[in-house]
Image (tube, helix red, strand yellow):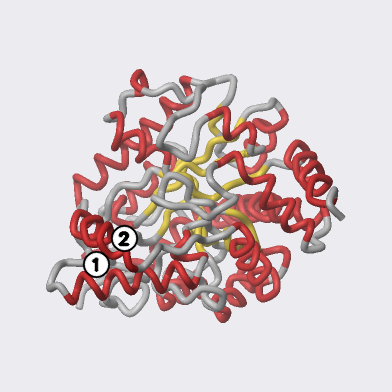
């Protein structure tokens, strides 16, 4: 029995050599912008990058075959500022790919992912995180698609005028008529509809409208950890009926009930002091004092595996994937310290009696199927109708 974990780890590494691991969300691009001002001359991704979860050597050790690089910009940016900053992040990811051609390759389709993987490169896809990035314009949406963006998360932490977020006070009641048109246009383009961050009402509306499979690019199971960013069981069932995939994340507050309870306790303490819990500086200051009497609990790899198991149990083996959210969180579970740790998670699932074929589906097979089905819907939809010229002003008039 003592050799079983080592044997499982070896099997996991072999699987990752044979099947591209497609991770749904990584925020390295924003980390580079924040720390190095978008100047790639100031950071060498071919070496260990201290203070990050991601660089090329660790991606290689982790067996990552394809990565959705997030072109996230803060939801507080709106209008032209949101669009311009998103375009700068798209440019940053393209420059990153161009700078390391032996390691990274732009992928625009499922076939592109498999082709890059076969050549020994990490297939690089782009995902825009939040509908604020299109500033209410379907033309901007189409331009992002032309630039390689292959999913749009409908909201981030704040509502957009046409969709409610999971972590903001509801206003739209889900998707507005313009929001539904966004989903239809994404289906026509072949851009994946990403439901991470959105309110349950928004997700239900999107799944009702969608012709193509949708994804949760980085979310957990609500039944395992009660956080609004996680997916309740009824939505997991609707996602399965839609043909989509929930890509399980590693963010401790979404993974661990104990971490979630600690964060809620910290928030209550901040509010008790009459301070703003949304202010990052305030949170950091109060947390430094709070932790002395309330040690911060640790999330674990086993808890992540519980989320994966639960999504599989409720939605089915065809509808589960991985979306770590590395470099998008200040903390990670023990055992999943950085992007080199994916083999350890796969080994854990093998120890839980997952078959190698089931692990291959989780690793990337399910997401590649979703991409292919979205591409097929795009071909048929584009043959029936042209680009939508609808405006938010026309559709969402009160």
- Tell me the quarter of the image containing the C terminus: bottom left
Q: Secondary structure at mark 1?
A: helix
Q: Secondary structure at mark 2?
A: loop
Q: Which residue is mark 1?
A: 394
How many marks on residues?
2
Residue 215 at x, y percent in the picture: 54, 60
The numbered mark at residue 240 is none
Compared across the picture, whether 325 is left or right of 318 comes to left
Compared across the picture, whether 290 is left or right of 384 comes to left
The answer to whether one can see residue 177 in this image is no
Count residues near mark 2 (Cα–Cα under 10 Å), then give few for <14, some for 14-19, many for 20+. some
Residue 377 at x, y percent in the picture: 59, 57
Residue 388: name its quadrant: bottom left
Residue 305 at x, y percent in the picture: 65, 62
Residue sitting farthest toward the front: 293
| 355 over 101 or under it: above or below | below
Which residue is nearer to you in this view: 118 or 247?
Answer: 247
Residue 275: name its quadrant: bottom left
Q: Which residue is mark 2?
A: 390
> CA–CA distance between discs 1 and 2?
7 Å
Compared across the picture, whether 296 is left or right of 358 comes to left
| 159 over 139 or under it: above or below | below
Count residues near mark 1 (Cα–Cα under 10 Å), then give few for <14, some for 14-19, many for 20+. few
Residue 4 at x, y percent in the picture: 84, 51
The answer to whether one can see residue 350 in this image is yes
Q: Are the residues tagged 1 and 2 within 8 Å (C-beta)? A: yes
| 39 over 352 or under it: above or below | above
Compared across the picture, whether 200 is left or right of 1 comes to left
Residue located at (42% from left, 39% from top): 28
Which residue is nearer to you in this view: 348 or 78?
Answer: 348
Residue located at (65% from left, 31% from top): 116
Residue located at (38% from left, 43% from top): 71
């Amino acid at each position: 029995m003592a050799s079983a974990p080592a044997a499982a780890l070896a099997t996991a590494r072999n699987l990752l050599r044979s099947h591209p691991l497609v991770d749904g969300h990584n925020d390295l691009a924003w980390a580079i912008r924040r720390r190095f001002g978008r100047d790639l001359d100031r950071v060498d991704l071919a070496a260990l990058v201290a203070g990050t979860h991601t660089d090329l050597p660790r991606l290689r050790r982790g067996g990552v075959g394809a990565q959705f690089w997030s072109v996230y910009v803060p939801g507080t940016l709106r209008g032209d500022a949101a669009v311009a900053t998103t375009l700068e992040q798209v440019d940053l990811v393209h420059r990153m790919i161009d700078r390391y051609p032996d390691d990274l390759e732009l992928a625009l389709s499922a076939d592109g992912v498999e082709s890059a993987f076969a050549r020994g490169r990490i297939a690089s896809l782009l995902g825009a995180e939040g509908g604020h990035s299109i500033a209410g314009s379907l033309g901007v949406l189409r331009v992002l698609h032309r630039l390689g963006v292959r999913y749009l998360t409908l909201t981030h932490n704040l509502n957009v005028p046409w969709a409610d977020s999971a972590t903001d006070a509801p206003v739209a009641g889900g998707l507005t008529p313009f929001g539904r048109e966004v989903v239809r246009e994404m289906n026509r383009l072949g851009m994946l509809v990403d439901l991470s961050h959105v309110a349950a009402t928004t997700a239900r509306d999107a799944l009702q409208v969608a012709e193509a499979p949708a994804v949760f690019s980085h979310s957990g199971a609500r039944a395992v950890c009660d956080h609004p960013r996680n997916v309740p069981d009824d939505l997991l069932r609707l996602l399965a009926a839609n043909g989509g995939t929930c890509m399980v994340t590693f963010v401790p507050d979404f993974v661990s009930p104990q971490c979630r309870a600690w964060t809620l306790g910290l928030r209550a303490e901040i509010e008790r002091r009459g301070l703003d819990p949304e202010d990052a500086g305030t949170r950091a200051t109060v947390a430094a004092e709070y932790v002395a009497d309330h040690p911060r609990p640790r999330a674990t790899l086993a808890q992540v595996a519980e989320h994966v198991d639960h999504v599989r149990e409720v939605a089915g083996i065809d509808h589960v994937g991985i979306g770590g959210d590395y470099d998008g969180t200040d903390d990670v579970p023990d055992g999943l310290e950085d992007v080199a740790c994916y083999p350890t998670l796969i080994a854990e699932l093998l120890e839980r009696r997952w078959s190698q074929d089931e692990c291959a589906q989780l690793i990337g097979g399910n997401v590649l199927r979703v991409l292919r089905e979205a591409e097929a819907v795009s071909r048929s939809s584009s043959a029936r109708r042209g680009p939508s010229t609808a405006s938010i002003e026309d559709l969402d008039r009160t």
